[in-house]
Amino acid sequence: MIDTPRQDKRLSKIKIPVLLPLTIALFLIWLLFVGVAWFWFESAQQRSLQERITQFDDQLFQMQSNTSSQMAERLGLIESLVLSDESFPVETVFEQIVSGMKLSRLAWIKQSGELKFEVSASLLPLDIALQGRRVVIEENGHNVSHGLVLLPSGDFVLRVVRVLAADEGMLIADYPFAIGLRQLAKAQGIYANLIVREERVDKQLMQAYPSVATNQPAVPFTEQSLSVFSSDALVNVREFAPIYEQMKRDSELERSAFATSVPLAEEYYDVSVLPLFNGKGEPLAEMMVVKNATLAKQETAWLQWVVTIAALVIATLLMFFFYFLLGRIERSIQSSEIQIIEERDRSESLRIESETLRLEAEGHRESAEAARDEAEKASAVKSEFLAKMSHELRTPLNAVIGLSEMMHEDAKEFGDDDYVEPLERVIRASKHLLNLINEILDISKIEAGKMELHLEGADLDALVAEVVETAEPLAADKSLDFIIDKPELGSAEVDPTRFKQVLFNLVSNAIKFTDTGAVSLKAVLDDSRLRVSIEDTGAGMSEEQVSTLFQEFVQLDSKSNRKHEGTGLGLAISRKFAQMMGGDISVSSEVGVGSIFTFSMPIQRPTDVNDLHDDSAVEIKSLLLIDDDPTSVELIKKYIPSNVEVIVALNGVQALSLARQHQVDLITLDVEMPLLNGWDTLAALRADKTLADIPVVIISVSEERERAFSMGATDYLVKPIKPNDIERILPRLNSTSHKTLSVLLVDDSEEIRISSRKLFERLGVTVFEAGNGEEALEKLSEHKPDFMILDLMMPKMDGFELLQKIRGGVCQDLDVYIMSAMELTPEQKQWLEGRANAVLSKGGEGENSFLHHMKSIVQEMR
């Protein structure tokens, strides 16, 4: 632990650099705050003065308006009396009005300018009062005017002039402005002074005719102005002359001017100067308004100092707070330094431990990678073993089944009844063994994720009929009623092999586990979904048995295992196939009553075309059969019509030679062969221009349709084949001209390329792919396809640029079909019409249209 003196010394070294700028910052903040506060208080006093003077000005204006209105009413009354009765005592009315309203003058002047009658409290003669001024009757109909008038004698009067009707002249009334101003100033507690420039008055008239309203002589105010009226002066009015001149220089008296807290004779005053205008808006004089502001100044100063001291106290408290807070922070930092040192030592030890663990983990990772490599090798060995086992087991087994079926047919034909039943047992046992091998291989493929569906347009009624036809003898052998209840199902995109496999497994299981009664098959189509229910009257199952029904290698019980043959894989495989097709298998059962298995799956209707091929009839007259197994050769030859010439090749090398020599119409090809296997043979056939158009049907024990179609195979059969397999493909091949086409598919969307490739492969078209325009140009330099499908929106090089390069290069005659989802402008459509064969749309209805057009294109080009 660090000793206290050293610690205090270190803390002081930290505090001083921090506290010094903090103190300066607090001082500057305090100074700014005090300055803003003082300015705000001064501004508040200024605003208060402006509001007070504005209120005084409004009241003064209101006083003028009210007085003018009253005077106008009185003049109107005089007009109505005079015009209605000439004998009315005008003198009495004039005197009453002058006395009642305290007017300085009321006069009636004839139209000729002659004074008819006057009552005046002013000594100033009327002609001088009206000197230089006369009222002109306006043509717009207004007969009353009023305004503030500065008389030559220095008096301010509020004058109202009313023009009389019938050319009777006019009435003029003057009200002393000083009387109203004094009353208003006294009510507001302020001092008002009227200031005029010397050139606007006549000093001789001012001395000869003093104001009867103010009773005050004019006082010189500045060198060029006079104070003609003062109300209750606070000090000598001339004391305010310098202030007035300064305010006049600052504002030129175009508007009101204000000055607050002006020191004068140990007092403070708020001063404002207001300009006065006559009725025509001409400036007459200025009115200076003064109010004692000593008390307000003291109050403002007291508030300013209170705020200043309060802000200083708060800043001091903040300074002490930061001082003590900084001390705590410094002590916390000191403690943290000690902890950091300790943690650093601890982390160093942890780093060493982690490095050790990393090395151990590296060793484990290497071991895991080695184990993974071993597992991958084991998986590859397993796949190779399954493939070899599939070939080695199923090839001789197919021969056994084929030969047994041939011997069975011969025995029945020649009446050798002693051999019929044993041969049937051999066929059943062989097919059972083949089914067992197929189930084991299927479950292995499913677990390895290598099982794929091969969707094609198929007749569901025909598929169900095949299952029923196969199952009817099984039901007849057990004397069971086999009931079929289904509507017309139509065609759908399904995998026919897996569909029949699932359906036959459910039907055969129902027959196998039912001793008496009936088995029924009921199909229902509901909202694009197919549901097939298989119901039996067998022994039924308990809930426990149902819960384990779809597990692999699991059967009902040991008693059932002894009574019924099977591996327990059929239902497990069927359910997995159903789920791969987007559906499922469900079961409901009751012991002693029976069971109901329901197979449901979505139905997608095939595109609206009659067939994948055109109707140009080319009869098959010769066939090249390629297979290294003589037994398979004999079986296949038996199923081929007698009018077709069959040429046999036992390996791929011999097949290529015979194919070039005989130019056959059809080739059947096995995959597993010596010297040159089936895949290499197919590649060689498609690479030879003289052989590329011959249709090739793969006949193999393995299920690799996708690979076969991608390499240009026309059809695919899985051994053991049946007579109806040959009967099914020969008419279709007879109706095809067999020209092998190739297409370059250019699209940046991998999903679009995959779906389009599957369509073209089903049509027997070889597919080349490119993800953008640059890749497409490379493909075109290597191989020229028969036609190209082109997207427009792609990275690097879009469809427009690629099409421009194609039409200007070596592929000018290449058929190009545009497939795009973008909205084309009329200019783009016009540009494409001269360079592309057709423009198709992606998605929705456009997708169906695309499939239809592609099949039409293939038919046309063939």
Image: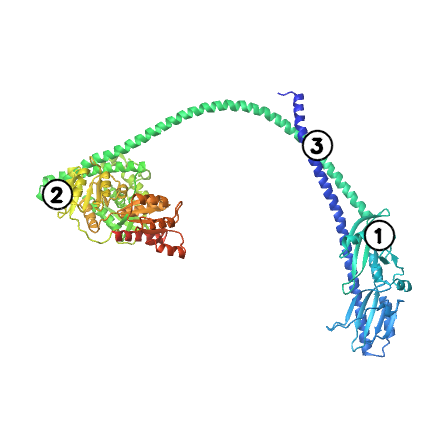
Residue 251, percent from left and from top: 76, 54
What residue sits right under mark 2 in the picture?
409
- Residue beneath the point at 37% across and 49% down: 799
Residue 528, percent from left and from top: 33, 51
* Nearer to us: label 3 or label 2: 3
Q: How is the image coloured?
A: rainbow
* Mark 1 / mark 3, whichever is N-terminal: 1
What residue sits right under mark 1 in the picture?
240
* Mark 3 / mark 2, whichever is N-terminal: 3
Q: CA distance from mark 1 to mark 3?
A: 51 Å
Image-based side of 209 in relation to 376, left or right = right
Say if mark 1 contacts mark 3, CB within 8 Å: no
Q: To which quarter of the image does residue 31 belong?
A: top right
User: Of 70 and 246, which appears nearest the observer?
Assistant: 246
Mark 3, residues whose alpha carbon is within 10 Å: few (<14), some, or many (≥20)? few
Toward the right, the furthest residue is: 208
Q: Amino acid at mark 3?
A: Phe
